[in-house]
Amino acid sequence: MVKFLKPNKAVIVLQGRYAGRKAVIIKSFDEGTRDRPYGQCLVAGIKKYPSKVIKKDSAKKTAKKSRVKCFIKLVNYQHLMPTRYTLDVDLKDVVSVDALQSKEKKVAAAKETKARFEERFKTGKNRSVGKSYFSAYTILVSFSFMDFV
């Protein structure tokens, strides 16, 4: 069988607390582990999307609206819907399975992930033309998912 859930692949979480949220695969485990005997992925995703920014907003308000909240989670393959898009932000050195073991490590990894997502969002690479740049449905366009709607 062809392995298509590869690192840096964009996915949508289908079940659980973050259902409907967009995420990116960091590492995949086809065989599972002893305590989780099924295929799973370590994903980092967007918990809260940036709000729409308008011209008359002040710089302070624009900065507040441009914030991103993220999550890190181990997710069953069955609970992910892969997309054809990839993300070119490198998160392997930041997020690992060890980061999920303790609260302090998870918070530190989430903060670094948030910083990288926000930096990617603010640079505006692969921004889609003619679409709402800050809309929740096209937010991952700014994260290099091109015309994902």
Image: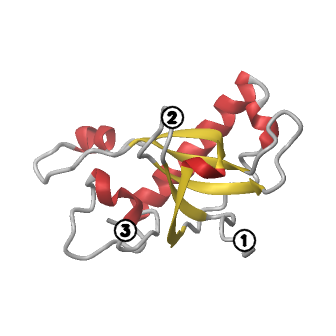
Q: Which residue does the image show at 26% across and 54% down from the upper left?
A: 135
**In the drawing, what numbered circle is on residue 3?**
1
Nearest to the observer: residue 18 or residue 132: 18
Task: Residue type at mark 1: give it.
Answer: Lys
Is 26 on the left or on the right of 85, as rendered? right
Q: Position of residue 78 (x, y in %)?
A: 60, 50
Above/below status of 103 relative to 12: above
Quarter of the figure with residue 49 = top left
- Residue under label 3, please give it: 148
Q: Which residue does the image show at 33% across and 45% down from the upper left?
A: 50
Circle 3 SS class: loop
Q: CA distance from mark 3 to mark 1?
A: 22 Å
- Residue under label 2, please give it: 16
Circle 2 SS class: loop
In terms of sequence position, does the residue under pointer 2 or pointer 3 come before the other? 2
Crowd around label 1: few <14 · some 14–19 · many ≥20 (10 Å): few
Of the two numbered discs 3 and 1 in the rendering, the one whose residue sits closer to the viewer = 1
Residue lying farthest to the right in this orientation: 34
Task: Residue type at mark 3: give it.
Answer: Phe
Above/below status of 118 relative to 74: below
Q: Position of residue 131 (x, y in %)?
A: 21, 68
In terms of sequence position, does the residue under pointer 2 or pointer 1 come before the other? 1
Crowd around label 2: few <14 · some 14–19 · many ≥20 (10 Å): few
